[in-house]
Image: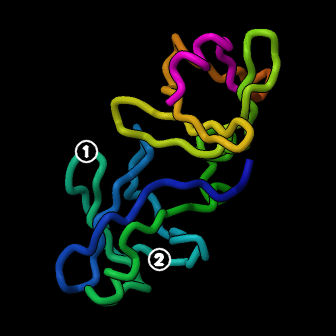
Amino acid sequence: MSNILEIGKIVRPHGIKGAVKIISYLEDEDFTKFKQILIGKKLEKGNITKISLLNKDAYLVYIDIIPNIETAEQYRDQYVYIDRSEYKEFKDKVYLSDLIGAPVLDENREKLGELVDFDDYGASVILQIKAGAVTYSLPFVEDIVVYDDKLNAFVTTKQKFEDLRV
């Protein structure tokens, strides 16, 4: 488990003063508690100077390294992270992003592939599973695939994997 935790995504600039709209990936967590975030693949540090809730999971955020709309536009579609070691409530929690690289096993514990990514559509999560040279999509639904923390692996049946993968 990495100390870096993906918590959301900058979806667009908001206004001319450099604010950005961030969609939070954290259910049941108050995004306003974050003071410093990391942005993009380079993990640029930014201090939140002002934040307000727009709706259930979207926030209007002012960040010190984004002074205007032109700069804000450069951060469009960038992911937002925190250093979980700075927040005790995140230290021991395991999130789906922590499980990238975990194997996907069948009922006989034979490896079918490994988790390479996931898409969270709110109502459902779709796992991206690489099996050989091909990447398949599989819904993360309890009747289809479950995560076994003792095995540190996702488990499904070979039949369901073959029938439901896309």
Examine the structure image and report whether residue 161 is included in the region drawn in magenta: yes
Q: Residue at x 56, y 61 (%)?
A: 82
Q: How many marks?
A: 2
User: Given the image, on which type of amino acid does mark 2 rest?
Assistant: Asn
Location of residue 57 in the rendering, given as x and y in whole percent from the top left corner: 30, 48
Location of residue 105 in the rendering, given as x and y in whole percent from the top left corner: 74, 22
Tag 2 residue = 47
The front one of 53 and 120 is 120
Q: Does 49 appear above or below 111?
A: below
Quarter of the image where one finds residue 54: bottom left
Q: Residue at x 28, y 83 (%)?
A: 18
Q: Is 90 left or right of 23, judged from the image as shown?
A: right
Q: Residue at x 37, y 39 (%)?
A: 121
The front one of 116 and 76 is 116
Tag 1 residue = 56
Q: Residues within 10 Å of mark 2 (few under 14, many from 20)?
A: some
User: Given the image, on which type of amino acid does mark 1 rest?
Assistant: Lys
Please, what secondary structure does the residue beneath circle 1 have?
A: loop
Quarter of the image where one finds residue 48: bottom left
Location of residue 143 in the rendering, given as x and y in whole percent from the top left corner: 52, 11
Location of residue 7 in the rendering, given as x and y in whole percent from the top left corner: 49, 54
Pair 1/2: label in front: 1
Examine the structure image and report whether residue 98 is included in the region drawn in magenta: no
| Stretch in magenta | 154-166
Q: Does 23 appear above or below 68?
A: above
The tag earlier along the polypeptide, 1 or 2, is 2
Q: Residue furthest left?
A: 15
Q: Residue furthest front?
A: 133
Q: Residue at x 77, y 29 (%)?
A: 152
